[in-house]
Image: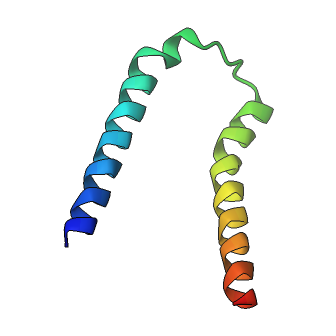
Amino acid sequence: MENQLGLVLKLLLLSALLSLLIKYAAPSVSIAATATNALIIVLLPIVIIAIALLWRFQAQKQN
């Protein structure tokens, strides 16, 4: 139970830091509004999760 509480607190802290980063640092970053950038922003999380799941699946398959 203590381990789960630690995980939740770490996740909450990471989420708060990411939120502050987006709120204060992101407006200073200039990204052009193009179709290519929109596709990258939309598809990149999906690709990262797919790679992570495939990597995990292969690790389980070897064990």
The colour scheme applied to this rendered structure is rainbow
| Quarter of the figure with residue 62 | bottom right
Q: Quadrant of the N terminus?
A: bottom left
* Residue farthest to the right, as pictured: 36
Is 46 above or below relative to 34? below
* Residue farthest to the top, as pictured: 28
Is 2 above or below relative to 62? above
Determine the residue positioned at 66% across, 64% down: 52
- How far across and how far down the image is residue 39, in percent? 73, 42
Q: Quadrant of the C terminus?
A: bottom right
Tag count in the figure? 0
Determine the residue positioned at 22% across, 61% down: 5
- How far across and how far down the image is residue 38, in percent? 69, 36
Determine the residue positioned at 70% across, 50% down: 43
| Quarter of the figure with residue 20 | top left
**Residue nearest the observer in this picture, 18 or 32:** 18
Determine the residue positioned at 50% across, 13% down: 27
Is 32 above or below relative to 3? above
**Residue nearest the observer in this picture, 32 or 17:** 17
Q: Is 4 displayed left or right of 22 in the figure?
A: left
- How far across and how far down the image is residue 19, in percent? 37, 31
| Quarter of the figure with residue 40 | top right
Is 40 above or below relative to 24? below
